[in-house]
Amino acid sequence: MPRVVLNGVTVDFPFQPYQCQQEYMIKVLECLQKGVNGILESPTGTGKTLCLLCTTLAWREHLRDAVSSLKIAERVQGELFASRSLSSWNAAATSGDPIACYTDIPKIIYASRTHSQLTQVISELRNTSYRPKVCVLGSREQLCIHPEVKQESNHMQIHLCRKKVASRSCHFYNNVEEKSLEQELATPILDIEDLVKNGSKHKVCPYYLSRNMKQQADIIFMPYNYLLDAKSRKAHNIDLKGTVVIFDEAHNVEKICEESASFDLTPRDVASGLEAINQVLEEQARVAQQGELQLEFSADTPSTGLNMELEDIAKLKMILLRLEGAIDAVQLPGDDRGVTKPGSYIFELFAEAQITFQTKGCILESLDQIIQHLAGRTGVFTNTVGLQKLMDIIQIVFSVDPPEGSPGSLVGLGISHSYKVHIHPETSHWRTAQRSDAWSTTTSRKQGKVLSYWCFSPSHSMRELVYQGVRTLILTSGTLAPLSSFALEMQIPFPVCLENPHIIGRNQLWVGVVPRGPDGVQLSSAYDKRFSKECLSSLGKALGNIARVVPQGLLVFFPSYPVMEKSLEFWRAQDLAKKVEVLKPLFVEPRNKGSFSEVIDAYYQRVASPGSSGATFLAVCRGKASEGLDFSDMNGRGVIVTGLPYPPRRDPRVVLKMQFLDELRSRSGAGGQCLSGQEWYQQQASRAVNQAIGRVIRHRHDYGAIFLCDHRFAYADARAQLPSWVRPYLKVYDNFGHVVRDVAQFFRVAQKTMPLPVPQAVTSSVSEREVSVKEATLSSPLLSTRKAMSLDVHVPSLRQRPIGLSASGDSESSLCVEYEQQPISAQQRPVGLLAALEYNEQKGGASEKEQALGSSTLSLRCEKRLSVEQRGGRRKVRLVSHPKEPMAGTQDRAKLFMVAVKQALSQANFNTFTQALQHYKGSDDFEALVASLTCLFAEDPKKHILFKDFYQFVRPHHKQQFEDICFQLTGQGCGYQQGRRVPKLILFEGVGRQLDPGEHLNQGRPHLSAHLLPKGFGMFVRPHHKPHFLQTCADLTGLPTTSKGLELPGPKEESVTVPSELAHEDTKPGPSMSNKPEKTQSKISSFLRQRPDQSVRSDDCTPEPMKPMKPERSKQ
């Protein structure tokens, strides 16, 4: 590997570094050698992770060599090195205190936002020549392999794990000391997944193994909330003294600093804590009565470790009741605004409940004992979330212990300058939601009040790191601009700053501000314009035109989920979404993180599929897609930003943050360097935009275009907030036609001059621990892609339409697509409970004919479209009656259903659900099953779909009963028919509307809508039968006979011409796509999949005459 000498330190780099990489490494070395802090911005794709790793590890090796040289010099001084002083040996290594021994060499703590990002960092480390001792810290939720503990919720895992460790009943933990020195565990560079894999292999606990490795590690990887949250820092026993701390992807540090030091205490939290304490109080009272003669009333539960007097438990309950009363006693104005008080008010409020600096230790110890006592229990009354939250809140409020002899209130007053207390009415609807427990406190019968304690200064957490003795603090990311305001917010000195340029050339990036759409309407996401019909329509047309000229993958970022959903709803109503999908199918970022990996993988597959025209991914600024996801090369050739994503202006937290900054600025005087509230507000929008546009260029040979579709981007102050590597390329356009022209030219040049990207296998965004879920959801790529493209699945507002009216015209648009039916072969045996139930159903009630319907028109249509794409866009279509790849089987459908249920229910309720299934399997007790399902699904209308979908797993002899119960509880049946099963997909999309009894039957009108079958079927009639067929058509429809009527009515769906609404003077670059005469099979396929509303044409639209069929086709 090439060696580069920078500031006296030799750095091994995998390749000859670019100039911007050398500058970045020099700045890192400056921070390390001088022991100062630095803020370093370098665009994504410039290799900043590799630079950080190589530079810091080279510096550590240089220090080690310096220590070795110093020790040698001490021994032989006066003989060989008489003319050189000892202090000169490590002058190049550090300008601070000299490093005298190996233990003084600083550890490197490398923190990033998530474990998936850390996995990428560790992968980069493996590509270097450095082999340091590595440790990755994670939570029990990620690392625990004990089968009993890992199924619990996060905080219960902690207490159950502690209990098993204390009693030495976890054999994985017992093996840690013995096996931690094994070569396979201690030597290699392991990421979080490797730890779990090797821990399972060697039967050793990965969680405690990583904590053991931390002591000897040279570099420690962890999510940065472990550092910024004082509670997590203490729990993981992280010693920061003398360390070098690196925050990668640091654009989120400000937010994490504030959130880790804030809380919201709801009435439900207090009520939950009271219920848990009541349970323990009653239980211990019964034990005391039974064992009055014994000295220890808890003798019958020695393993729980609870050693509390009844009086202490009662005092704890009294403290919670007083806290609840103190919050309820706060007077609120008549509206829902709430009241705001200074941060010091929290100490007054807690003092009324006798929670102070003096009592906090006893209270925390008592709460911990009770949670430990309840850990591992099952049942509806063992919810300890409220108690755990109270513990966290007390630790946040009293985070800094006062010096001995000083009153704690003074310390609290000093800290509380960064805080505000906000008390407001509870607006959530948790009381109406389905739950299996009953709250008996007063808060469940009246509207409660939420106590919020919000930190508004990230400097609070940053200064704490400095107090802990951090030697050097480096914040780095691709989007930190503007650096000056970022440093001001941290309130600690950053002497070293860098705003690096990109490593790309001018022909690799196009950036344009698009203030107006194709129709000349101004584009704006301002509050008063974002939902106007003109603006939404113009934005939709602009998207359609841009999709024509951007090859492969296109990303569209919206300011928020509501804006994205409203836009989609409007575009669908106006047919704009359909016109975009003709060019590039739409994939939508779901709100639910659980289904995100499925959608993004389907998008990657669509873009990479042979002959594909690409795809469009609709996402949200600050969402998962905008954070560190890989859209390199063909996955992201264009990024559209549809507006400035300002925070919600009326949100109390946003209002108070702006007030706090304005107050801080006024206190600091005219010469003070502080952000104003308005500057912070604008900065939040620009940071989110910068993070989104960072998706477009991911490496040295990548290229792409950025479209800023909001007229406000043309303002000078908005342009000044963009990254330095974007600003030189920026151009403001007055005419939309010039946008299309320049972008088309840009991509023509780029495709000729840039090297083709190396094909890569589609990689999932999920971790290995999610593989089982991923296999269930992606077992059928075809079904997965169709589901991911179904906007209704991911956008709730598009699902709310009248029953019987198809949302998209696609039968898979409802949630039932998740449970796609595929018959089991005779040789295939069911595995698991749900598969066994389904197997019994099939064996008992399904006919061969119904099983054959499993190969639905959905797979038929997709197969036809794929065969067209694989032929490079040729018009000839080969009908395929059976898919080449099997659809999702029964096991996969069962897994999908279980995944949906697990996402919808809490852990306790999900356990209840699985127990009910097991009981039903063994006992065939239908009444008990229905009772359990009613409690879980029937009370919440949002879960009715899950209740109805459970019908497919009910045994055949119970189906009619389940149908009746479902109708009583939800108002809708499950589709039960005597003697046959429910078809899982409607084979013809318009059939529901064609045979609507309210519109057609017995009304004296045609029985089928708009002459669909007579006119459309004409193409199949042989020439010598056509006169008779024409007469029959006239008799049925009442229209005059015409030979032109034999042509298939409706639009030609196979046409690739751009709709008139999207058409513009500039044409798409690339091969010609002129219309060719349609082949008969194209007409057949169009006829088979046309929608009823498409078949209704105005009388003045005369179809083209039909071309004669080939004889061999007629015989078919």
Image (cartoon, grey):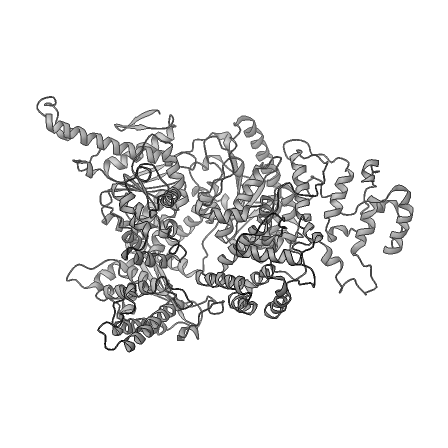
- Is the residue 1063 above or below the residue 843 in the image? above
In the rendered structure, the answer to whether residue 1097 lies left or right of residue 646 reads: right
In the rendering, at what x and y percent does residue 175 appear? 30, 47
Q: Is residue 966 visible?
A: yes
Q: Which x, y percent locates residue 1063?
A: 67, 41
**In front: 491, or 678?**
491
Vertical comparison of 306 with 585: above or below: below
Is residue 848 shown left or right of residue 35? right
Hey, which residue is sitting farthest top in the picture? 80
Q: Quadrant of residue 314?
A: bottom left
For residue 23, which quarter of the picture?
A: top left
Confirm whether residue 798 shows in the render: no
Could you tell me residue 434's position as x and y percent? 49, 67
Query: In the visual, does 1079 lie left or right of 550?
Result: right
Quadrant, the C terminus: top right
Question: In the image, is residue 71 above or below residue 1028?
Answer: above
In the picture, the quarter occupied by the N terminus is: top left
